[in-house]
Amino acid sequence: MAAPRRGKPPQHFADLAPDQRGPAVAALGEKAFRAKQLATHYYTHLTSDPAEMTDLPQAGREELVGSLFPPLLRSIRTLEADGGTTVKTLWRLYDDVKVESVLMRYPGRSTLCVSSQAGCGMACPFCATGQQGLTRNLSTAEIVEQVRLATRALARGEIAGGPGRLTNLVFMGMGEPLANYRVVVDAVRRFVAPAPDGFGMSARNVTVSTVGLVPAIDKLAKEGIPVTLALSLHAPDDDLRSELVPINTRWTVDEALDAARRYFEATGRRVSIEYALIKDMNDHAWRADLLGEKLTARGKGWVHVNPIPLNPTPGSIWTASERHVEAEFVARLRAHGIPTTVRDTRGSDIDGACGQLAAEEAS
Ligand code: SAH
């Protein structure tokens, strides 16, 4: 197989902020007001097909649309679970790099889990993507295209349950979103901009999940887009967390929790603490108590905990905690007054968690 070209993906309309679109269209010899028509086609009608853009002059339409909307994502494999309401797509990018996204449909809402990087540099040993290392950052448009294609599949009734709407977005696919900061924030701006400038989603329904890059959390708090922050903690003590989330040697548990608390103060958004429960590793009752103490020490009503049963990666020695251990862990947190909900394990039979499909494809 040819070695991937590690350049930049071709620039795409979705990379452009609203005020950059008119000039981009004008640079191609078209009237600047066409930018709004293009935005409507893309963000509202969810299309980048010139044949569907009949309000544009036919002369030069193919060329105009072709240069503003280069194909960035090609679906090379889809896997379904839960009666077709969970759909995982493996995408091939322009340089043959692969990433995945997962759509999960529930009664009354649909969540898309998007990738922000191909691979990941954070090296968490329990995470399939972490084992691959970082290949490259995605571009804003490569992220926005994951969202457009899922929104379109729902709108067209291609997902079990009939036509629907995408309501929630989580940056819990491949990559560390805050390590690709500018690109991710720009993508979020496209998600929340009112139509036709963007998809018009609610910021609170967008979740940015991070290993805890403290300066980036503080920066995100100042962007004026109140997205939900999820902090992947996985241990309340530095010894264990440094093993499970190696960036902890740079920013400790206390530093990460302080940043999460500041995020809540700046945005009013309740923070989620992610905690993959790994049998005999981090699931001890004393660790639930220590976590409860550390969270309540920082105030009330600012945080909730999402324990996630570990989805074992191929070759891993680790497994999910036993049910009664998980129940005890949850009960202890609740006894500290911390709202706690175990994450459902949609799609674990299609390797729903993190990078496993792309890992399989690469090997
Ligand atoms: N890099 C970001 C986002 C991607 S992972 C982050 O770490 O937050 C999204 C969530 O899935 C994180 O909480 C991550 O720790 C968790 N995760 C990764 N591998 C997992 C596995 N095998 N089982 C359960 N959760 C996992």
Image: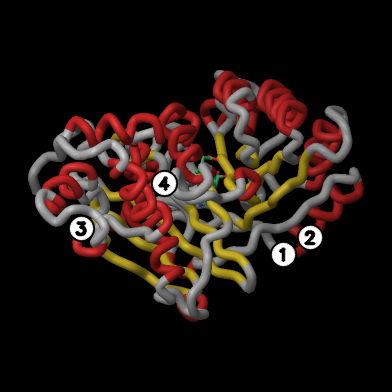
Q: Which residue is mark 4?
A: 115
Look at the picture and state if 244 lies above or below 54. above
Which numbered tag is attached to residue 327? Answer: 2
Colour convention of the picture: secondary structure
Which numbered tag is attached to residue 323? Answer: 1
What is the spatial separation of the Cα atoms under label 2 and label 1, in whole angstroms? Answer: 6 Å
What is the spatial separation of the Cα atoms under label 4 and label 1, in whole angstroms? Answer: 30 Å
Look at the picture and state if 85 lies above or below 252. below
Q: Position of residue 73 (x, y in %)?
A: 26, 52
Distance from mark 4 CB to nearest ligand 1 atom below 8 Å: no
Q: Position of residue 249 (x, y in %)?
A: 56, 21
What kind of element bears circle 4? loop
For badge 4, the amino acid type reads Ser
Q: Would residue 245 be visible to someone looking at this image?
A: yes
Q: Earlier in the sequence, mark 4 or mark 1?
A: 4
Distance from mark 2 CB to nearest ligand 1 atom below 8 Å: no
What kind of element bears circle 1? helix
What kind of element bears circle 2? helix
Estimate how packed mark 4 is, as few (under 14), some (14 to 19) or many (20 or more) residues with alpha carbons within 10 Å: many
- The structure residue drawn at horizontal position 64% and vertical position 41%, both measured from the top left corner, is 228
Mark 2, mark 3: which one is toward the viewer? 3
Estimate how packed mark 3 is, as few (under 14), some (14 to 19) or many (20 or more) residues with alpha carbons within 10 Å: some
In the drawing, does residue 33 fall left or right of residue 163? left
What kind of element bears circle 3? helix
For badge 2, the amino acid type reads Ala
